[in-house]
Image (cartoon, rainbow, N blue to C red):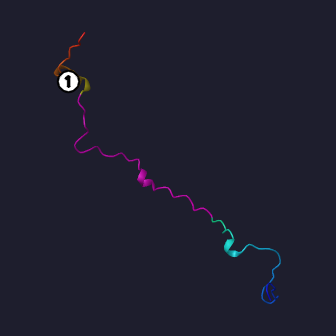
Amino acid sequence: MGGEYEESEVEVEEGCQTPKHAMIPATFACPPPPKKKAAAAFSKKKKAPPPNGYFHPPDLELELFFASNAAPRRQAWA
């Protein structure tokens, strides 16, 4: 009665096996790398210049000349 099993109740298999719920799943293959973008995105065609033209910055030396003459000079105290 207590801890005894009849042969008909429990099927005895040869050897030891890991239970199905504890088995490590098989590894999957890594996905392929992403595809390169189409060549049209990297076109080597030159762009047209802006309709209003390019910005021409003023001469820096000229700006510094006028800025230095307009600012009041400080006297160094000895």
Specify the segment rendered in magenta: 29-58
Q: Give the SS element for disc 1.
A: helix
Residue situated furthest front in the rendering: 2
Give the image quarter of residue 28.
bottom right
Tell me, yes or no, whether the highlighted magenta stretch contains residue 44.
yes
User: Is residue 68 left or right of 8 when viewed as pictured?
Assistant: left
Q: Position of residue 35 (x, y in %)?
A: 51, 58
Report the residue marked by disc 1. Answer: 67
Q: Position of residue 64 (x, y in %)?
A: 23, 23
Q: Position of residue 61 (x, y in %)?
A: 25, 23
User: Is residue 10 left or right of 37 when viewed as pictured?
Assistant: right
**Camera-side residue of 45 and 3:** 3
Q: Residues within 10 Å of mark 1 (few under 14, many from 20)?
A: few
Q: Is residue 25 above or below residue 46?
A: below
Tell me, yes or no, whether the highlighted magenta stretch contains residue 47.
yes
User: Is residue 46 left or right of 35 when viewed as pictured?
Assistant: left
Q: What's under tag 1, amino acid-wise?
A: Ala
Q: Quadrant of the C terminus?
A: top left
Q: Position of residue 62 (x, y in %)?
A: 22, 23
Q: Is residue 53 above or below residue 43?
A: above
**Camera-side residue of 23 and 47:** 23
Residue situated furthest top in the rendering: 78
Seen at 69% across and 70% down, the residue is: 23
**What predominant SS class does the magenta segment belong to?**
loop
User: Is residue 39 left or right of 12 when viewed as pictured?
Assistant: left
Q: Quadrant of the N terminus?
A: bottom right
